[in-house]
């Protein structure tokens, strides 16, 4: 039997050879040790640049797990309470019926404000002060706490500004100083520095989904307007690379993803414990699992993380938690086995169509390490 590194490398090479993927990285930690660090394919077909371990990818909503971790760290230190209204920390947020919305509501996607303000352009999204001011004026679409609908982008503006107002540092600075620096991570960025642009793998579209595009009057289109498509083109804009999107725009590699999740479950083997054991338990406790009003299927959600369940893509058991990103990148951890995994890639396959890669990689990693599903 080949060792886990060799087995994973063979799988990635095969995915690229069969043109399932263009470029991909996988990193896996077990008991706090990096045991798989593999990559394959091209970062940029236009130049022939190959993927290596330092290549950076836009992993979209994988960053939500990092943003949630920042909020949980502030809760651990007593600076944020999940059930205190956000308006207590950010008075303007109370406008138009949002006075009762709490961090718990936003983390669990039950706040009722999944929609972005009307009349915007992609360039508007890159202006942090303008966007948080506009989001503070939104009106909830449902009574907070009574339904769940994926807050694809507003999650980041609300929780990112909550962190800034409570801690005093912008969310990108907090993440760098309180999460990345202690863990020795220099390959995760909220707002890409110019010096790192040469390491980015531009995104490309995958196969079109076998269903029609959501109609203009759908809730989905209020959350992700038509100007966000094609998604790869939006994410390849330089102004998007440089902007701060704590819900949907982290630039990182698979090592960074897996390292953060490992730090959440490895009991501070290296002296760094991002969250207390009790805080991690609270953060990963199931909050809702009914049908999501935006995505139209049931998603088991904890506080800022998806958790394991029958239809969950992070795993089947409740001890597994994490967050996927559009196109098939993912970060996850298994509390029981102290297993953490990150996938980053540049071909955007729909997460149902792209199950081949996500499922195969997770299954192969677990099988190679002897960890049950």
Image: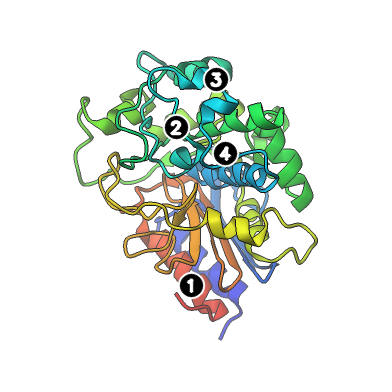
Quadrant the N terminus occupies = bottom right
**According to the image, what is the colour scheme of the structure?**
rainbow
| Residue at x-position 55% and y-position 17% | 127
Circle on res. 101: 2
Q: Is residue 34 left or right of residue 98?
A: right
Of 352 and 305, which appears nearest the observer?
A: 305
Circle 3: is it few (<14), some (14-19), or many (20+) Cα within 10 Å?
Answer: few
**Disc 3 to disc 2: CB gap under 8 Å:** no
Residue 234 falls in image quadrant: top left
Q: Secondary structure at mark 4?
A: loop
Give how far apart the Cα atoms at labels 4 and 3 are: 28 Å
Front: mark 2 or 4: 2
- Name which of mark 4 and mark 3 comes first in the sequence: 3
**Picture disc at residue 91:** 3
Pair 1/3: label in front: 3
> 10 Å neighbourhood of mark 2: few (<14), some, or many (≥20)?
many
Above or below, 99 relative to 92 = below
Query: Horizontally, is 155 left or right of 114 in the view?
Result: right
Q: Is residue 56 left or right of residue 295?
A: right
Q: Which residue is mark 1?
A: 364
Residue that mark 4 sits on: 250
Q: CA distance from mark 3 to mark 2?
A: 12 Å
């Amino acid at each position: 039997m080949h060792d886990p590194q060799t087995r994973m490398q063979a799988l990635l090479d095969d995915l690229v050879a069969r043109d399932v993927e263009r470029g991909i990285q996988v990193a896996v930690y077990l008991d706090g040790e990096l045991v798989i660090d593999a990559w394959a394919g091209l970062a940029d077909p236009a130049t022939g640049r190959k993927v290596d371990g330092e290549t950076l990818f836009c992993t979209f909503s994988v960053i939500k797990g990092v943003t949630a971790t920042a909020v949980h760290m502030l809760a651990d230190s007593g600076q944020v309470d999940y059930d205190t209204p956000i308006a207590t920390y950010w008075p303007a947020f109370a406008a138009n019926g949002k006075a009762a919305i709490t961090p718990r509501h936003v983390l669990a996607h039950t706040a009722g404000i999944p929609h972005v303000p009307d009349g915007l352009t992609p360039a508007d999204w890159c202006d942090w002060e303008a966007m948080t001011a506009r989001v503070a004026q939104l009106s909830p679409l449902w009574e907070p706490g009574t339904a769940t609908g994926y807050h694809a982008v507003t999650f980041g503006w609300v929780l990112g500004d909550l962190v800034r107002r409570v801690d005093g540092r912008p969310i990108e600075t907090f993440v760098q100083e309180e999460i990345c620096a202690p863990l020795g991570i220099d390959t995760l960025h909220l707002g890409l520095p110019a010096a790192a642009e040469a390491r980015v793998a531009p995104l490309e579209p995958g196969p079109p989904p076998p269903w029609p595009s959501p109609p203009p009057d759908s809730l989905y289109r209020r959350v992700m307007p038509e100007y966000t498509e094609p998604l790869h083109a939006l994410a390849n804009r330089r102004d998007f690379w440089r902007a701060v999107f704590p819900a949907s725009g982290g630039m990182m590699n698979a090592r960074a993803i897996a390292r953060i999740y490992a730090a959440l479950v490895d009991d501070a083997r290296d002296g760094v414990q991002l969250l207390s054991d009790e805080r991690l338990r609270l953060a990963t406790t199931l909050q809702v699992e009914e049908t999501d009003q935006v995505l139209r299927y049931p998603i088991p959600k904890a506080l800022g993380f998806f958790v394991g369940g029958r239809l969950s893509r992070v795993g089947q058991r409740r001890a597994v938690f994490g967050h996927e990103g559009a196109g098939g990148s993912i970060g996850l951890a298994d509390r029981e086995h102290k297993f953490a995994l990150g996938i980053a890639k540049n071909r955007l396959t729909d997460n149902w169509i792209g199950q081949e890669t996500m499922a195969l990689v997770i299954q192969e990693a677990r099988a190679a390490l002897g960890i049950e599903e």
